[in-house]
Structures are given as structure tokens and as C-alpha cells.
Image: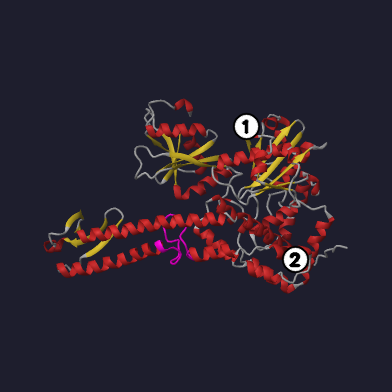
């Protein structure tokens, strides 16, 4: 669009083109009032892909600019459609209140949504991770890292053997990422790129080589680097290819998300040899997680074994099936836990009953840290945490090492439960900026302002009764609308009874509306209190969310233990159902 930018464009369109210049590879959702508008080529593309009306807008040129728009409250639905069709979307928001802004409202891109960076629950599959993978190619070797932004999981490894590229294809098949971020060495390798595109339906982003930095200083400072046994990585400097991929992926995520990512705090760096080697053809032919014919789940190994009660358990099971263990000790630990759950009917039943009431703590924790959780998410989290003491209690007498470990390490998170319980109303609204979120008794100032608004409404009722008495106008009423505020309405047949102290405010077909000094004072008190309480509730809500976000590591650890218990119980249910015989350690 750069060639269109000249002095003849209107000031608003010049601002739009300046922003678009920075996001050439994206469809730019440009906020104008209650709509996100798209212009020029973006508008033409969006109108075609979303099946919305293509219109035009005066832009200072002889020809009107092609324009298409979607309501801001429905933007997620339209964005998800564009992402599914292989587009990136840059969201340009109003950064100041149009009512108080001088001149053109300041706007800026607050986030870029790509296939691998989706965090919205309604755009994600509950029981499947949404991974983004970064690949660094140097000579014949590779370093790669994968992350699910919605959960905070982050893994990395290196490929340095005699079968490098086929092994890379196997690792892509292991994670089935929705987006690849690659360096120029890989992007310029036509043969390898054609094989990747042939085998996988993945959005591919070529990222600047300068971000594939082999220095580990940043990640050592910011992240807990561990191996698959959760032991600290001591020799990270020796894994420069993995480091390069990690640095690039972190940079890409930060560039697109433009917000705190505190829930991404641990990176697991593993040896590929830890898991059973399954090449891409074996995964496809075994139909572990999807059918060869139609990519569906029904009829796969996952479909047969998945009796999990939670969505995070479903994702955990998928990971275990994609990463078969070869460590006999670890295999037997799982088998002993499954055996105990299979043979103890009461234990298994109690676990299942409690897990059915646990929601996706893993992704809820991510939303808290990400800063896009609403009050309903908090209530969902609270209701899940309410079940943890019972989950822990039923494991108290377990004997198998894995179940004992879950019992001993399961954090019940009751301090977070109590915080939400005392602060957030049981049935909060969807939005967080319209008030009605904070419970009475949590904050003295909120209580005082809410009392003022309640009493104010009683004052209005009392004033209406007094005015009817004073004027003798029996059908006089005091009303309110957002444009004119409070008013006294008198029908035209009673206008001769209107006292001089009434000041005309609005003329209707069959009535006149007035204001009095007393009503004006009441209006200032009521509306002032309502405006203050809405603002104060939002501030309190964000502080509560930030407090929960500080505990994201605890939440993630608990989510991992609960999802592990869910998978073990799922295996026990399947074993009982299909009468499979599990071996024990021996």
C-alpha cells in the first residue's frame, strides 16, 4: 500500500496506511467506533473470504477506497475464519477515549493473531494442543522448539545424526504444529521445503536470521531450563542450535502478542532418543490420533483409549501417545498406578466423580497470566479449585509410587479459591468494564458507591411522588436515558400545570421533558457514583487477576498433576472395559 500514501489522502487514511505499512503480511483490523474496518486489498480479501459486504469510503482520492467491516463484538468469529483460511490478522485498537481525544483518535496494533498464536478458548480445540514450532537449520543439522501459548508448554531439542531431515519430519509429525517459524537456511532449501509442504498443512513464517541468536544469556535469565526429569540443564551453551530456535520463537511470540507471557516460564530440553522413534509414515499408518482417510479422531488409538474427564487430561493423553516411553522404570511406574486404579473400584469412581467437575486449569492459568481472563473465567477456576481437596483426599491411601507422588505434591490452591470466593460475584457479566463484578463486602469504597446508586434510585422514586403531589399532575413521571440523563416528563394535556421552576429539556410529540435543580443534583450524585463504581470495580478486578497470575507456576504444576491422574484413570477405565492385562514391574 506504500505507493498509495501521499498528501491527497485524508488524515485518517494516512494514519491507516502508515500502520498497514508495518504489517504488510497481515489483514489489518482497524478499529473505527463499533467496527473493525478493512480497506483496499484487505477489504477485497476479507469480503471474499468472510462473505461480507464490500463498500467504499471517501479517502481524499478521486475514487473511494474499497472498505469492509465487522462488528467489534463479533471480531473473534471473523478472525478465526481468516486464520483457518491461512491469513494473519493484525488488530489495531483505539488507544484513547474518542470522547476525550483531540483530533484523530490515537490507534495502534495491540496484537497479531496467527495460526500458532491463538489463545481464545472458542478458537481452540479443547483436547488438542495448538503448537507453534521454530526451526533453525545450520548446515545439515537442526535445532527446533515448540510452544503452546495457551498453556505455556515449551519444548526444544537438537537433531545431529545421520538421518537429520527425516528425523525433523518425524518431530513435526509428533507435534503437528499449526505454524512454523523458520530461518533463511531452511526457507531457501527448495527440496526440504517442498517435502514439508507436501506432508503438512502448516502456515510457514520466514523470520529474520538475526533473531536466531545462538547466545543463551536471555533464556538462562528468564526461564527455568530443565530436562525431561525436571533437572536443571547445566550445559545449555553446548546446545546452540536449540538455543537459536528458542530465541527466535520467544522473539516471534513477543512481537505478535505484545503482552506479558509470564505463564511461559519453563523450557524442557529433551533428547529425541528418550522416546520411541516413530517416523511420519508409522504415525500415519498406525492411526494414533487421526484417521488416514479423513483426519478424524473416531476409530483411532486415541479414540479407543480416551476416557479422560478433563480437556487438559485429553491433551495430556494425546502427548503420551505421541511420545511413547522407552524407559522401563518410567513405564512400570505408570503401569503400577494404572493397576491400582483398575483394581480399586471405589478409588477409581471417586477420582472420576471429582475430575468431572474440574475445568481446564491449565488454559485458565494461561489466560490469567496473559491478561485476557474475564470474571466468568475466575468463577470457572474457583469451581475447579473447590474440587482439589476432595481429589487429594481420595489419593491419601494410594500405594503406587506415581499416585503417592501426585498426592504429596498436589497443591490445593485454596488461597486462590478464597480470593475469588470473597471478591467475585457468582454470576458475573461477560464484560469486565461495565461493573457488576465485585461482591459487596470485599471493598469499602465499592460498597459505599453501590449504596449511593441504590439509594439514589430510591430518591428518584421519592422525588417523582413529591412532584406529583406539588404539581397535581397525576401522570407525571421521572425517567432516564443515556442521551439526556434524568428528566421529568409531562404530557401536553397537563402543560398548563407545569411550574416555573421546571426548565424545558426536550420536546416530544405528545409530551415535554424538564429538569429541575433538585433533579440535576440527584443526577450528578447517582451518575457520578455509577461511573466511579464501574471504574473502581475494573481496577479491583485487574488487581485480582494480577494476583492470581503471580501464582501461575503453582497453577500449572497442579494442572499437570491433575491431568496425569486423569490419564492414568482413563487407562484404568479402558483396561477394565476392554479387559486388557497390564504388566507390573518385576
Q: Residue at x 79, y 47 (%)?
A: 278
- Disc 1 target residue: 208
Residue 201 visible in the current orientation: no
Q: Residue at x 59, y 51 (%)?
A: 124
| Start-end of magenta stretch | 424-445
Is residue 571 shown in magenta? no
Q: Nearer the viewer, residue 463 or 220?
A: 220
Q: Residue at x 54, y 45 (%)?
A: 259
Q: Main secondary structure of the magenta part?
A: loop
Q: Are marks 2 and 1 in contact (CB under 8 Å)?
A: no
- The image position of residue 452, as x and y in percent, is 33, 64
- The image position of residue 153, as x and y in percent, is 66, 50
- Disc 2 target residue: 404
- The image position of residue 406, as x and y in percent, is 72, 63
Residue 106's tag is none
In the image: residue 73, left or right of residue 556: left
Colouring used for the render:
secondary structure
* Mark 2 or 1, closer to the camera: 2
Instruction: Give the residue at the far right of this rendering.
Output: 586
Question: In this picture, is 210 found above or below 130?
Answer: above
In the image: residue 489, left or right of residue 260: left
Q: Residue at x 44, y 63 (%)?
A: 443
Amino acid at each position: 500500500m506504500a505507493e498509495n500514501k501521499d498528501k491527497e489522502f485524508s488524515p485518517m487514511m494516512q494514519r491507516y496506511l502508515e500502520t498497514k505499512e508495518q504489517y504488510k503480511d497481515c489483514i489489518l483490523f482497524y478499529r473505527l467506533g463499533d467496527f473493525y474496518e478493512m480497506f483496499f486489498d484487505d477489504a477485497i480479501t476479507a469480503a471474499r473470504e468472510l462473505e461480507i459486504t464490500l463498500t467504499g469510503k471517501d479517502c481524499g482520492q478521486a475514487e473511494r477506497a474499497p472498505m469492509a467491516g465487522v462488528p467489534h463484538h463479533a471480531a473473534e468469529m471473523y478472525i478465526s475464519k481468516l486464520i483457518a483460511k491461512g491469513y494473519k490478522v493484525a488488530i489495531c485498537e483505539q488507544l484513547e477515549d474518542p470522547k476525550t481525544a483531540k483530533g484523530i483518535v490515537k490507534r495502534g496494533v495491540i496484537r497479531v493473531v496467527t495460526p500458532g498464536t491463538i489463545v481464545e478458548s472458542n478458537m481452540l480445540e479443547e483436547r488438542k494442543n495448538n503448537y507453534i514450532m521454530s526451526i533453525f537449520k545450520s548446515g545439515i543439522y537442526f535445532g527446533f522448539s515448540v510452544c503452546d501459548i495457551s498453556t505455556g508448554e515449551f519444548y526444544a531439542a537438537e537433531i545431529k545424526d545421520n538421518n537429520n531431515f527425516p528425523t525433523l519430519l518425524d518431530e513435526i509429525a509428533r507435534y503437528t504444529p499449526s505454524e512454523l517459524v523458520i530461518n533463511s537456511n531452511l526457507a531457501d532449501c527448495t527440496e526440504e521445503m517442498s517435502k514439508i509442504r507436501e506432508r503438512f498443512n502448516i502456515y510457514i513464517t520466514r523470520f529474520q536470521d538475526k533473531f536466531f541468536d545462538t547466545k543463551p544469556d536471555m533464556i538462562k535469565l528468564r526461564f527455568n531450563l530443565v530436562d525431561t526429569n525436571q533437572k536443571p540443564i547445566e550445559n545449555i551453551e553446548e546446545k546452540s542450535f536449540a538455543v537459536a530456535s528458542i530465541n527466535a520463537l520467544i522473539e516471534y511470540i513477543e512481537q505478535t502478542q505484545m503482552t506479558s507471557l509470564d505463564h511461559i516460564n519453563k523450557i524442557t530440553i529433551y533428547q529425541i532418543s528418550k522416546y520411541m522413534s516413530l517416523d511420519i509414515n508409522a504415525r500415519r499408518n498406525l492411526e494414533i490420533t487421526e484417521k488416514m482417510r479423513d483426519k478424524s479422531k473416531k476409530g483411532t488409538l486415541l479414540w479407543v483409549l480416551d476416557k479422560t474427564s478433563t480437556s487438559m487430561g485429553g491433551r495430556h493423553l494425546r502427548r503420551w501417545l505421541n511420545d511413547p516411553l522407552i524407559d522401563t522404570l518410567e513405564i512400570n511406574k505408570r503401569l503400577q498406578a494404572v493397576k491400582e486404579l483398575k483394581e480399586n473400584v471405589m478409588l477409581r469412581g471417586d477420582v472420576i466423580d471429582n475430575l468431572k467437575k474440574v475445568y481446564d486449569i491449565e488454559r485458565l492459568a494461561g489466560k490469567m497470566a496473559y491478561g485476557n481472563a474475564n470474571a466468568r473465567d475466575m468463577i470457572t477456576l474457583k469451581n475447579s479449585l473447590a474440587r482439589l481437596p476432595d481429589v487429594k483426599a481420595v489419593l491419601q491411601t494410594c500405594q503406587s509410587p506415581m499416585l503417592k507422588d501426585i498426592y504429596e505434591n498436589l497443591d490445593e490452591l485454596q488461597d486462590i479459591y478464597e480470593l475469588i470466593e470473597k471478591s467475585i460475584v457468582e454470576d458475573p457479566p461477560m464484560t469486565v468494564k461495565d461493573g457488576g463484578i465485585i461482591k459487596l463486602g470485599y471493598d469499602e469504597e465499592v460498597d459505599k458507591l453501590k449504596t449511593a446508586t441504590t439509594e439514589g434510585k430510591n430518591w428518584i422514586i421519592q422525588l417523582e411522588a413529591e412532584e406529583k403531589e406539588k404539581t397535581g399532575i397525576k401522570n407525571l413521571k421521572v425517567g432516564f436515558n443515556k442521551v439526556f440523563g434524568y428528566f421529568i416528563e409531562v404530557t401536553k394535556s397537563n402543560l398548563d400545570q407545569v411550574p416555573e421552576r421546571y426548565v424545558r429539556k426536550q420536546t416530544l410529540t405528545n409530551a415535554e421533558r424538564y429538569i429541575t435543580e433538585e433533579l440535576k443534583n440527584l443526577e450528578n450524585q447517582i451518575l457520578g457514583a455509577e461511573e466511579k463504581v464501574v471504574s473502581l470495580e475494573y481496577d479491583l478486578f485487574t488487581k485480582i487477576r494480577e494476583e492470581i497470575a503471580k501464582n501461575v507456576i503453582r497453577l500449572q504444576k497442579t494442572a499437570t498433576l491433575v491431568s496425569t491422574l486423569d490419564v492414568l484413570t482413563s487407562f484404568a477405565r479402558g483396561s477394565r472395559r476392554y479387559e486388557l492385562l497390564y504388566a507390573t514391574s518385576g
